């Protein structure tokens, strides 16, 4: 019985060290966020920072620490551009500070404490004016 209690104690200690040695955002959030794209009308081509990614509706995983310029294009409609920004989650910083300097360094270095400021982008496209 003593051996089981010692094993459980070591396991708890090991888990505490891992959490303290890693950033909270690194453990629980990661480096990407899901971003959903839709358009009205549907079927617009979605470009992220100038690169074609697919047709709306669409879901992508994007790195959380960057901002993105999203462009929706559909023939017969004006293009629509939307900027998606990222910001540092204050909750991650507070948790990191509670657990010490190492988690702050880890999350700052990896950028994992950033999150995209929205999880869905919908573009209402306007018909082009007749020339």
Image (cartoon, rainbow, N blue to C red):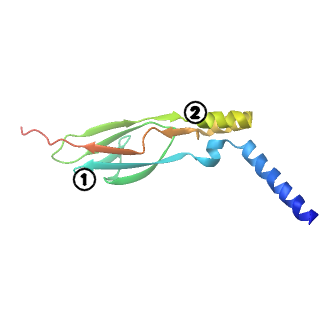
The answer to whether residue 24 is left or right of residue 6 is left
Callout 1 secondary element: loop
Give the foreground label among 1 and 2.
Answer: 2
**In the rendered view of the protein, which quadrant contains the N terminus?**
bottom right
**Residue appearing at x 93%, y 63% in the figure:** 2
* Depth order, front residue of 114/68: 114
Label for residue 42?
1
Residue ranking furthest to the bottom: 1
- Cα distance between the residues tagged 1 and 2: 36 Å
- Residue 72 x/y as whole percent: 28, 44
Categorize mark 2 by other alpha carbons within 10 Å: few (<14), some (14-19), many (20+).
Answer: few
What residue is shown with label 2? 90
The answer to whether residue 90 is left or right of residue 118 is right
The part of the image, by quadrant, that contains residue 118 is top left
Categorize mark 1 by other alpha carbons within 10 Å: few (<14), some (14-19), many (20+).
Answer: some
**In the rendered view of the protein, which quadrant contains the C terminus?**
top left
**Residue appearing at x 68%, y 36% in the figure:** 96
The answer to whether residue 16 is left or right of residue 61 is right
Number of numbered callouts drawn = 2
């Amino acid at each position: 019985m003593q051996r089981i209690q010692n094993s459980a104690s070591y396991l708890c200690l090991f888990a505490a060290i891992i959490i303290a040695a890693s950033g909270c955002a690194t453990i629980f959030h990661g480096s990407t966020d899901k971003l959903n794209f839709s358009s009205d009308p549907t079927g617009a081509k979605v470009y992220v920072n100038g690169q074609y990614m697919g047709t709306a509706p669409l879901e992508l995983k994007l790195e959380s620490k960057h901002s993105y310029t999203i462009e929706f294009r559909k023939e017969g409609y004006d293009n629509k551009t939307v900027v998606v920004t990222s910001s540092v989650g204050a909750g991650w910083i507070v948790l990191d500070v509670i657990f010490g300097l190492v988690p702050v360094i880890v999350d700052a270095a990896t950028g994992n404490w950033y999150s995209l400021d929205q999880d869905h982008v919908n573009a209402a496209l306007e018909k082009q004016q007749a020339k």
